[in-house]
Image: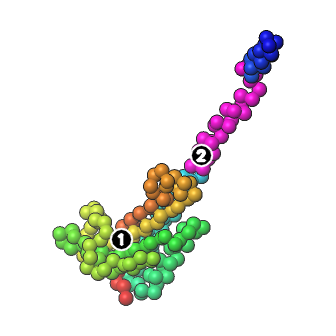
Amino acid sequence: MIRTSRSAYRFCRGFATDRSGASAVEFALVLPILILLLAATVDLGNALTVSRKIDQIATTAGNVISQQSTWSKSNVAGLLSGMSFILQPYDTAGLTIIVAAEDVNSSGAATTNWSAALNTSALPAGSAPPISIPSEIQEQGVQIVLTRVRYTFTTPLSVVLSYFTGTNGYTLDRYCFSRPRTADKITYN
């Protein structure tokens, strides 16, 4: 009986002093954290790329509209449709673009003269813009071209984290202001 307890003691003491599997245990404990960091880095990189593309859509659409004094509805519709290609290879289903020519009166209040949109409703004529136009760029009698781009970007990690955060993806909402370049007003017919 004493011999059995001595051998059991030596056997247990061998486990306590044996360090050959410590690295494997440490690696098993750290691996989930490393995988989460890798996934978060890839997720953030994709989100930053999409954010840059949304900024590019907003500025490019506003700049192109500003370069002509007259636009037809079909030309603006084609332009907005073409702007969605900037977002590729990402899904463009949730992309909305609004371009509006805003009239500014002597008191600095802006109203929509005309508007066109992709995947959403255009702003009604005479309505207030969805964002106030900075006073630094307002000039009476000169229209302001307002471009608004909205997009919700969903990644596999954001779907998993939505169970904890309650939000599913990154919602991007960008504005761009520009002035007409060839005339004070842009006509739309």
Q: In which quarter of the image is the N terminus?
A: top right
- Residue nearest the observer in this picture, 116 or 142: 116
Please state the horizontal and vertical placement of residue 86, each as a whole percent of the image. Answer: 54, 69
**Crowd rating for badge 1 (residues with CA inside 10 Å; few <14, some 14–19, many 20+):** many
Q: Mark 2 points at which residue?
A: 36
**Crowd rating for badge 2 (residues with CA inside 10 Å; few <14, some 14–19, many 20+):** few
At x 64%, y 36%, the residue is: 29
What secondary structure is the stretch in magenta mostly built from?
A: helix
Q: What element carries label 1?
A: strand
Please state the horizontal and vertical placement of residue 33, each as a whole percent of the image. Answer: 60, 41
- Res 104 quadrant in image: bottom left
Residue 20 higher or lower than 88, as above or below: above
Distance of label 1 from label 2 (alpha carbons)? 40 Å
Q: Is residue 33 magenta?
A: yes
- Residue nearest the observer in this picture, 117 or 156: 156
Asked if residue 86 shows in the view, the reply is no
Residue 79 higher or lower than 94, as above or below: below
Q: Which residue is situated farthest in the left direction here?
A: 107
Q: Which amino acid does label 2 sit on?
A: Leu
Left of 157 or right of it: where is 104? left
Q: Which residue is situated farthest in the bottom direction here?
A: 189
Foreground mark, 1 or 2, reads 2
Left of 122 or right of it: where is 35? right
Q: Name the residue under label 1.
A: 146
- Residue nearest the observer in this picture, 72 or 96: 96
At x 74%, y 20%, the residue is: 12
- Res 65 quadrant in image: bottom left
At x 52%, y 77%, the residue is: 82
Q: Which amino acid does label 1 sit on?
A: Leu
Please state the horizontal and vertical placement of residue 121, each as a whole percent of the image. Answer: 38, 78
Residue range (magenta): 16-40
Q: Quadrant of the C terminus?
A: bottom left
